[in-house]
Amino acid sequence: MTARGAKVRWSIATAVIPVALIVLAATGGEAPPALPTTPIPDRPAAIPAVGAIGDIETVEIDGRNVTITGWAIDLDNPDSNSVRITVDGQFVDEVSATGTRFDIDAAYRNGADHGFEATVTLSRGGHRLCLFTAPDDDYITCERVARGSHKGVVVTRKGTMVGLVAARGDEYDIITPCGNEATITGGTRVRTTQILIDPGHGGSETASVGPNGLGEKRLNLDVAKRTAAALRERGYSVELTRTTDIRLPIAVRAGLANALDPDIFLSLHHNGGALNRSPVPGTQVYYQHDDDDARRLGGILYEEMFAAASEFPVAWVGNALDGVSTRLNDEGGDFYGIHRRTPDVTSIITEFLWLSNGAEAALLARTEVRNAEAEAIAAGIDRWYRTENVGSGFLKPFVDTFDSGGGGFEGCVDPPL
């Protein structure tokens, strides 16, 4: 994607996804100096050393009541025998963790009295349920729980995520990637997830292309898969809006996010179009204008991604919007459809480096750089869950209604399901 302030703009507004290709080399000749507005973020904060371990093992839903069972060990305070429970960041209960668990004792040699059971009351929809030790409030784990008429989505036998309208056994009425109604048999129903990663563009929407021929749509998907793997290694549940090279209009992407109701909806991109030389790597993060969780996540991700890019110094380019910001429309609401169409989901758009710059395109073609980007995003999300860090690198919100078109349903062709 090409960010605002460059000579060419790839936008992801309501129906804004680029349909043209751009090849811009910014590595030769003299270029004007970068505008001195790129914020230098704080160094990424360390995630606190593990002070507790545990797990939520079962979740049973009975009407409004949700019963969870699991185990917890406070490594810093062996005499502690309680866990605190939060729902969507709010404390709801504290229960004893003294149930006998010989399997936990055999595994960790910390005694057998570490099991717990708790029942909380939840409204309809998806909720983030987290455990902490008491009284130290050491983070243990989080899980996404959905109750009521929460439909979720279906991942077809070919691995394509589709919206769910109705389910009858293993037969599903669905909304296809291009927004059409269909009925399929088989597949896996997913009701919710902690993190939904959206690899930007795809199919006929190629987006930026580097001077080395590296296309953004393929790069986005590759890094998204690496990020998902890194997050799963950390114990998080993760889904991707696409796992293959297919077209997804903005409305469909947002619909999948609303259906899954995740903790985090991350739209992953790489930039194109900047020409100004920059002494630092150019990375942009956009967050929902009225979501404090999204703003905090944006600041943390910027710190991590900036630090990761800085390990591979080249002839950087950038523009005045490098940093963390929120883009508004004339009414003061979110301009980007990824944000505006998911008002109840914490959503973030990342733009890592400038693919249109030959030096940076060469970096992004390297496996270790893509791994570093993925690990940076995973580390940032881990910090968002485990700490109260607020992040840094923030710019002022700005109004920009420039719309380059695209991102709609015109010309969309459904893949085999």
Image: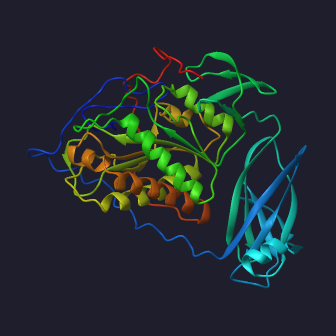
Report x, y in % for residue 385.
61, 60
Residue 141 in the image: above or below residue 397: below
Query: 6 left or right of 291?
Result: left
* Pick the front one: 219 or 289: 219
Residue 253 in the image: above or below residue 414: below
Q: Is residue 22 visible?
A: yes
Report x, y in % for residue 75.
69, 80
Query: 183 left or right of 371?
Result: right
Query: Residue at the spot x=48%, y=17% of the render?
Result: 412
Residue 417 in the image: above or below residue 349: above
Q: Residue furthest left?
A: 29
Instruction: State the count of labels.
Output: 0
Residue 154 in the image: above or below residue 66: above
Report x, y in % for residue 155.
64, 33
Question: The C terminus is located in which quarter?
Answer: top right
Question: The N terminus is located in which quarter?
Answer: top left
Q: Is residue 134 visible?
A: no
